[in-house]
Image (cartoon, rainbow, N blue to C red):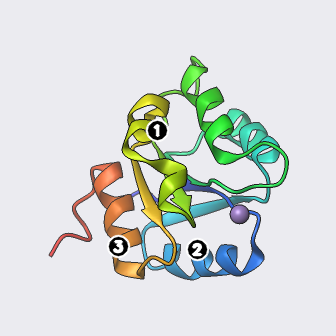
Amino acid sequence: MTAKTILVIEDNEMNMKLMRAVLQLGPYRMVEAADAETGLDLARNDPPDLILMDIQLPGMDGLSATRIIKADHELRRIPVIAITGFALDVDKENTMNIGFAAYIVKPFSVKALLETIAATLGDSSFDH
Ligand code: MN
């Protein structure tokens, strides 16, 4: 199986380390950005198969960044999973309006994260 590229946009280094540890359990190549602006540049230069988007970011937040992605002809096909510390950041209405594929509330389990990624990629390798 070809490794899927996952772009992680996350400003917290502890959370990024956790993502690194989790994603290496799957057939994934991880690309990292610590802010939305860098993440958008990376997505344009090397379109990932999926984006994990922290919502609370310095500068542009994850909701604005995802709106830009979903309005972009080249980027809109990329599924975006919101990663949030607050369920209220990404309520059901936001999820539908902005176009997130899914959202995960911190703290999340490794299993839940991998299953959500696999389901979003249409990959059954983590189904049990
Ligand atoms: Mn954050």
Q: What residue type is labelled 1?
A: Asn
Mark closest to the chain's N terminus, 1 or 2? 2
The residue that appears at 50% across and 78% down in the rendered structure is 107
At mark 2, the secondary structure is helix
**Closer to the camera in the image, 46 or 12:** 12
Seen as rendered, the residue at the extreme right is 59
Which residue is disc 3 drawn over? Answer: 112
The nearer-to-camera label among 1 and 3 is 1
Residue 47, position as x, y percentages in the image: 61, 38
Q: How much space separates mark 2 and mark 3, taking CA atoms?
A: 12 Å
Q: In this view, does 73 lie above or below 119?
A: above
Label 1 – label 2 distance at C-alpha: 24 Å
To which residue does mark 2 refer? 19
What residue occupies the far top of the structure in this picture? 73
Q: What residue type is labelled 2?
A: Met
The label nearer to you, 2 versus 3, is 3
